Image (cartoon, rainbow, N blue to C red):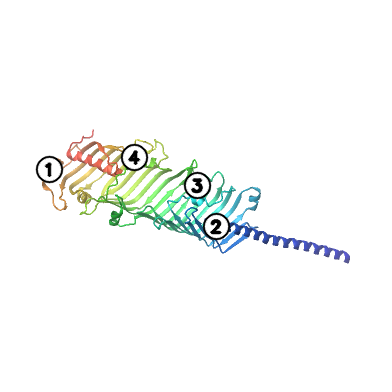
Amino acid sequence: MKLYLYRMQKKYKKKVLIVGVVILFLILAYFIVNSIAKNRIENYVKNLPDTIKVDYSDIDVSIIGGDLEITSPKIFITGKTTGKTILDANLEKINIEDVSIWSYLFSDKISIQNINLNQPNISFYYNKNVDMKDLGSSQSNSESKPINIDNFNINDANVIIYNTANDSIKFSANALNFNMKSIQIDSTTKNQIIPFEYETFNLNGNALFFQMSDYENLTAKTYKITDTTSLIEDIKLKTKYSRQRLSQIIPKERDHFDVVFESLKIENQSIDSKNDSVFSFGADKLILESADATIYRDKLVNDDNTYKPLYSKMLRDLEFDLGIDSVKVNNAKLTYAEKVKADNKAGEIHFTNFDAIIAKVGNVYGTSEPTKINVNTSFMGSSPLNVDWSFTVQDPSDRFVFKADLGFLNVPQLNEFTEPNLNVQLEGDLQQTYFTISGNPSTSSIDLKMKYDEFKVALMKDDGKEEKNFLSGIVNLFVSKDSDGDEDGFRFGHAEGVERNTNQSIFNFIWISTKAGLRSAVAGDGDKAN
């Protein structure tokens, strides 16, 4: 019995010893494999192309968990031909979690559960004269394996894009957080505009800044963007110079902007590519809330004589596919100021309580789906104005119809614009005005009817203080004082062949067409309605 127990104890000790040796071997193997993996990663980082430099304080690898952690990484990328910095990034940490070894060994693809970039501070140096392929040329040309990533996260990032041409900030965003799910990269996606497929994404942050041009900046306080919706709040589009300074530095006319939006919301949006080459953006609805816009134009600056296409052609000629079913503008305020004479202040017109609905905005709709714009607003503070405007983007003739219904207007309110700009003073009451303009890029016709009382025109001297009595008297000989046209008290105006100034906007075309109809009506040479 004792011999049996002795033999059993000896056999047990042998098994324990074997198990212990195996465990010790596995532990040693784990550390050895981890060390090998770590050394390989470190060697890979050391042997990156000369245009890429990566520094870090530590690398931690776990083969069993398939995890990689890089502490305090610093990444520098320079242009291959220029030698100048393209990207400079400092991060608190990079975590790559649960890399599937089995997937790599048996499915010949790379599967990763999570990639986390924590607190990155990223500076990108934009140079319009450098081909961005210069950045890509630094990468390996070896055949890449398919990659699946369950979650890609950027946490609490600060991003700045510099414009190297003038050492200014082109874009910046603070406290940026980003998550993208189910990313797939393979040979079928790498040649797309968006070189990967994904399921959903979520982006949010604050203090957004974007340099729209050399003259205007766009800012936003907060933004929340997903693959289906966007909400951007406290948006400001502003010219970065004063009105006077802008006029001094621009070579030709340009609007001065001071525009604020409470929010912009996009519902059921889609971002995609077509035929792997054409970018496309679509949405069910875009809503602009509580805009307050002041736009100023100094007409004393040299004219911009470039051709101004109508909106239908501008949309048709976009280099990407756009389709927004409905755009809503709620409770906006618009002031347009124009300075024509150096010694006079700028003339202004105002629109308040401005609401608009625009249907079918884009270039993806057919000829049976016209773009329709409906506006309801108060003109010059009190006069109700309704506008219906339509055109078909896919119609190469660019025909349009513009209808307006203007309610009671105390005509002297227009003097805020006509006196400083035209040296014309108006009197009387405009009780109701209807007009329809039918036009194309070259000419228009207008039918107008209006009801008014005690209408009078006074031509002022250049100082704007004294009236040119003789000329005013001659003008008023041709102006009917009251609208005594039909039994309802309307006078009618009609004009054809109104020529468009093609280096002016559509709104100038609407104005000169309306002016032709008004001149016909007050002079009494228009036709009555049937």
Q: Which residue is mark 3?
A: 194
Earlier sequence position, callout 1 versus callout 3: 3
**Is label 1 in a helix, a strand or a loop?**
helix
Disc 2 and disc 4 in contact, CB within 8 angstroms: no
The disc labelled 2 sits on which kind of residue?
Answer: Asn
- The residue mark sitting in front, 3 or 2, is 3
Q: Which residue is mark 2?
A: 116
**Residue 485 visible in this rendered orientation of the protein:** yes
- Rendered image quadrant of residue 454: top left
Disc 3 and disc 2 in contact, CB within 8 angstroms: no
- The residue mark sitting in front, 4 or 3, is 3
For image coordinates 60% across by 51% down, the residue present is 111
**Where, quadrant-wise, is the N terminus in this rendering?**
bottom right
Give residue 337's mark: none
- In-image side of 249 versus 60 (left or right): left
The disc labelled 1 sits on which kind of residue?
Answer: Ile
Establish if 316 lies above or below 249. Answer: above
Estimate the spatial distance between the alpha carbons at disc 4 and disc 3, rounded to whole Å.
34 Å
Residue sticking out furthest to the left: 470
- Rendered image quadrant of residue 29: bottom right
Earlier sequence position, callout 1 versus callout 2: 2
Give residue 390's mark: 4
- The residue mark sitting in front, 2 or 4, is 2
Tag 2: Cα neighbours inside 10 Å, few (<14), some, or many (≥20)?
some
